[in-house]
Image (cartoon, grey):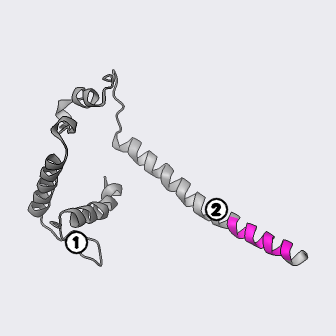
Amino acid sequence: MPKLRKVTRWIAWLFTRTLGLITVDPQTFKITSTIEEMAHAHDEWAKKVKEMVPAARLLVHKSADGWEPVCAALKLDVPSEPRLKDSKQISTILWRVRVVSTVFWPVGLAAVGIGMWANAELKRAD
């Protein structure tokens, strides 16, 4: 999903700060590490997590394992119909977030500006 590529900056920052195994261009925030270096960084990160988290509290899950291990770890019932999100649903959600954020900030700033102007007018009238 191209819209989620922006997350790579955060992932790069995370791996750079936590493991120092991925290199990032400070100007463009583009990852300059190779695929092999990134795979190694992920494996090192997973190894550290396994070392830090007690085995009784750690669930290493693969999607092929299904819902049962996750629900058992969370002490929840296995859902009869899992909620699936396909790319169209995610795109719709992202579009709604973009619309709300695009409308919210200008309207919010306009409201603050009007409030400040009205406050100044009221003070000047006194």
Total numbered labels = 2
Q: Residue at x 79, y 70 (%)?
A: 119
Residue 122 is a magenta residue: yes
Alpha carbon of mark 1 to alpha carbon of mark 2: how far? 35 Å
Q: Mark 1 near mark 2, Cβ–Cβ under 8 Å?
A: no
Q: Nearer the viewer, residue 88 or 99?
A: 99
Mark 1, other Cα within 10 Å: few <14 / some 14–19 / many ≥20: some
Helix, strand or loop at label 2? It is: helix
Three-letter amino acid code at the position of disc 2:
Gly
Q: Nearer the viewer, residue 61 or 27?
A: 61
- Residue 46, position in %: x, y? 15, 50
Q: Tell me which segment is drawn in magenta.
A: 112-123
103 is higher (above) or lower (below) than 126 = above
Instruction: Residue under label 1, please give it.
Output: 24
Q: Nearer the viewer, residue 80 or 68?
A: 68
Disc number placed over residue 54 in the picture, else none? none
